Image (cartoon, grey):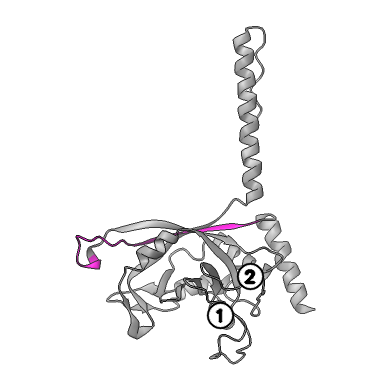
Amino acid sequence: MLVAKLERESRREAVEWFGEGPHTVELEIEYPQYKEELELADDWPRVRGTFRIEMAPLSLMPIAVNLFMQQVHHKLWNGCSFVINAMHILQAGPHRFSNNGKYDANVPELLNRFVNSRLDKMPFQEYNDEFPHDKYTVGFAGRPGGPDFYINKINNSVNHGPGGQTHHDLHEEADPCFGRLVGGMEILSDLGRIPVDYDRGALLLHPVVIVDSRVVATREEEKKEDGNEQGQGDQQQTNEQGSDGGGFNAPNPGP
């Protein structure tokens, strides 16, 4: 009963805020890009790229999808960092690179934005077998999940699915999987060249920062926008044809 109510309310809120979907999120990141002619990573130029994530259907993962889109909409991820680049995942959280490959974890300035907005944690480990942790999917880390999230660099459907996280008390639970990377795969290759400290859990030795985040137009909204632009274009063409005829000038479309 409680789970069904939480799912229903999350779905309602997501539709109210962001439309029916499908929904897409963009994360703009800044990172050092490898240059063969530069020996030290400290000298690599810092560039920007964008991860584009398509959210899981609201019918499958309404709570996790709504939580992440709300986090993005309220710009809570801006200034946070990707800190772990292991063989199987790339993980981000409210952490900040300090110096010499060291991080300040759960920086109050960053973490409190999530906590104060009540957008820091999942209420329970939502999971749906129809949206497993395949390669390039996105999931929440921790128990309960959030705010840290990760991109699956390989198929982690077993390790991060039901019963895969045996080090947690309720090991039969799974990490919530709520999105799929559909753009920016080349950035993963770039980040793979940045040195990491494997003795400390594959921590990145140089900062990879989320500088901006946004919920972009849903497919249905994009179709409407395309239709409006087409309609305006047709109207403009009609105006031009009328003008060429010399007998009638149609009025410009209203605002």
Given residues 112 and 208, the one toward you in this image is 208
Give the quadrant of the C terminus.
top right
Q: Is residue 118 visible?
A: no
Q: Is residue 105 visible?
A: yes
Given residues 180 and 169, the one toward you in this image is 180
Q: Is residue 37 magenta?
A: yes
Relative vertical location of residue 146 with respect to residue 240 in this rendering, above or below:
below
Crowd class of label 1 (few under 14; some 14 to 19; many from 20; radius 10 Å):
many
SS at mark 1? Answer: loop
Q: Is residue 130 left or right of residue 109?
A: right
- Image-quadrant location for residue 4: bottom right
- Image-quadrant location for residue 12: bottom right
Image x and y of residue 165, in percent: 55, 86
Badge 1 or badge 2: first in the primary sequence: 2
Image x and y of residue 45, in percent: 27, 58
- Image-quadrant location for residue 242: top right
Relative vertical location of residue 234 with respect to residue 18 in this rendering, above or below:
above
Which amino acid does the dot numbered 1 rest on?
His
| First to last magenta residue range | 22-42
The structure residue drawn at horizontal position 63% and vertical position 84%, both measured from the top left corner, is 173
Q: Is residue 218 magenta?
A: no
- Residue 160 tag number: 1
The residue positioned farthest toward the top in the image shown? 247
Q: Is residue 85 left or right of residue 112?
A: left
Image x and y of residue 253, in percent: 65, 26
Relative vertical location of residue 235 with respect to residue 61 in this rendering, above or below:
above
Image x and y of residue 219, in percent: 63, 50
- The residue carrying mark 2 is 131
The structure residue drawn at horizontal position 61% and vertical position 86%, both measured from the top left corner, is 163
